[in-house]
Amino acid sequence: MKGNISDVLINALMYIQKFKNKLFVIKLGGEVMLNENVMNTISQDIILLNSVNIKPVVIHGGGYEISNAMKKFGKKPRFVEGLRVTDEETMDIVKMVLIGKVNSEIVSRINKHGGNAVGISGKSGKLFLAKRKNDKIDLGLVGEIVRVNSEIVKLLIDKNYIPVISPVGFSNDGTSLNINADTAAAKLAISLNANKLIIMTSVGGVLDENNRVISRLSIKEAEDLIKRGIANKGMIPKLNSCIESLKNGVERAHIIKSREHALLEEIFTSKGIGTMVYKK
């Protein structure tokens, strides 16, 4: 945020008042954990949001960490349209990394900076009930959410805790399922009637055919980018998550780069830093 500090603060005040008591679902990409300074500043952003009566709910991925762990165990990661193919051994690695490592590190970092974060998984309180994803290609233990039981998240929010959620769900028979964090974030945002879904990733936003960031996209324009193949690979589940959330009550969706104080710049400035997807 550049410019005269008083102007910056007054501009931010307008947004603070606008978003008071609103709920934001913030999806952190696994790349956030790769840069300590970025993780520290994003943690501070989340705490600031909470301090001005904006309710942040954090859900995280961990793709980089999972792939690195797989390689250490001699397994080669495979993806289909941005989704990880997950056999039983890979599922064990997913749980170890997402719940045991990434979730606890994010919670520790937020709490270190004065926040009050609590880590849970999609299995906690039966948060994410899922079924195996039924695609033409067998993705293994990859799930799609059929029901979100968000009461545990609401209880934490009511007590002014910051929920930090890992996207591991479970089926009716208790089988753990790997759920794409972007799609889980959308389902959670819908269930919580969130004002915003914010997806943080390794790129600056949604790119056009000339690799330039698109600052604003309608639902129709986002769908067209996917149809024409301009949005591809890991951007497909991100854009689909934005589209689904907007069609089901979320007011705005954002895809932004994971960099220092990215949340504050996107939320508290008129220009923003990434791509905002909106209804029309």
Image: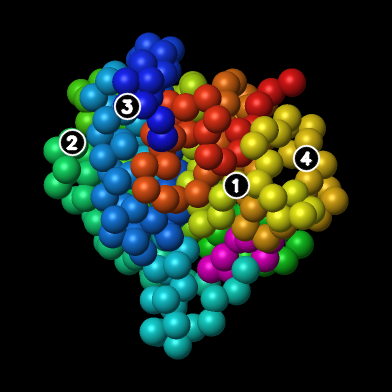
Q: Horizontal placement of 58 versus 235: left or right? A: left
> Disc 4 designates what residue?
223
Name the mark on residue 262. Answer: none
> Disc 3 designates what residue?
5
Q: What residue type is labelled 2?
A: Asn
Which one is in front in this view, the residue at disc 1 or the one at disc 2?
A: 1
Task: Please tell me which residue is depicted at 38% across the width and 20% down the height of the picture.
Answer: 7
Q: What element carries label 4?
A: helix
Q: Is residue 225 above or below residue 87?
A: above
Separation of marks 1 and 3 at Cα, in angstroms: 27 Å
> Disc 1 designates what residue?
205
Task: Please tell me which residue is depicted at 56% across the width and 36% down the height of the picture.
Answer: 254
Separation of marks 2 and 4 at Cα, in angstroms: 38 Å
Query: Residue 161 location, x and y as percent?
Result: 22, 31
> Mark 1 or 3 closer to N-term?
3
Name the mark on residue 116. Answer: 2
Quarter occupied by residue 57 = top left
Query: Residue 179 location, x and y as percent?
Result: 51, 53
Q: Badges 1 and 3: C-beta atoms under 8 Å apart?
A: no
Task: Please tell me which residue is depicted at 26% across the width and 50% down the height of the picture.
Answer: 40
Give the quarter of the figure containing the C terminus: top right
Name the residue at the bottom extreme.
Answer: 74
Q: Which amino acid does label 1 sit on?
A: Gly
Task: Please tell me which residue is depicted at 67% across the width and 33% down the height of the picture.
Answer: 216
Q: Badges 2 and 4: C-beta atoms under 8 Å apart?
A: no
Q: What residue type is labelled 3?
A: Ile
Q: Please say whether residue 83 is one of the residues in the magenta stretch.
A: yes
Q: Please say whether residue 257 is one of the residues in the magenta stretch.
A: no
Q: State which region is magenta.
A: 80-86
Which one is in front in this view, the residue at disc 1 or the one at disc 4?
A: 1
Which one is in front in this view, the residue at disc 3 or the one at disc 4?
A: 3
> Mark 3 or 4 closer to N-term?
3
